[in-house]
Amino acid sequence: MTDQLEIRRLQAEDIGEMVAEFQRVGSSKTAPLFDRYLREQQAGKREVLVARLTGPGRNFAGYLTIIWSPGYGPFRDAGIPEINDFNVLPELRRQGVGSRLMDEAERIISERSVHSGIGVGMGADYGPAQRMYVLRGYVPDGRGLMDHERPVTYGESITVSHDLAIYFTRKLR
């Protein structure tokens, strides 16, 4: 499958298909989100990598973004770019699409940084991503559980959401 895959930067003409594919699978990814990503890419703040199948039919397969100056303070302060908002269409998972996206993201990051960072959610739906990052050599940054990019303290009540995460880093070179 991965030999039928191209990875390229987000282009304006990708957005309609991306929104339609995410609606098809019940996700709330919207055109305004991807428009913002495109503007941030054009401004040099974010890189957006899109995976596309090269055969006939539906082409969009997944995407991820690289934030050059992340909101997560420890990464930002250390100059560690963050891989963020990583999505592969459900029917294409475990077929190498995510690995190819990560390979390209790490290649691009390695041109500017020794390390790559990534945050991953704590819900069960993030389990495959958690495993993938560990298998790729990512290790926890040692700061523990974060909620909206701030440390969770002992005894604190929190709501499990997409913003509950642990952050990992990997030395690239």
Image (tube, rainbow, N blue to C red):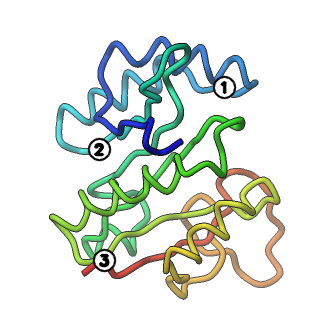
Q: Seen in the image, is 158 located left or right of residue 23?
A: right
Residue 9: quarter of image: top left
- Of the numbered discs 2 and 3, the one sitting upstream in the chain is 2
The residue type indicated by label 1 comes to: Ser
**What number is the disc on residue 134?**
none
Image: 63 above or below 36? below
Residue 105: quarter of image: bottom left
- Report x, y in % for residue 11: 29, 22
Q: CA distance from mark 1 to mark 3?
A: 33 Å
Image: 123 above or below 136? above
- Residues at circles 2 and 3 in contact by the CB criterion of under 8 Å: no
Residue at the disc numbered 1: 28
Secondary structure under badge 2?
strand
Quarter of the figure that contains the C terminus: bottom left
- Report x, y in % for residue 35: 37, 21
Residue at the disc numbered 2: 46
Along the line of sight, the residue nearer the viewer: 19 or 150? 19
Along the line of sight, the residue nearer the viewer: 2 or 32? 2
Q: Residues within 10 Å of mark 3 (few under 14, many from 20)?
A: some
Residue 108: quarter of image: bottom left
Q: Nearer the viewer, mark 2 or mark 3?
A: 3
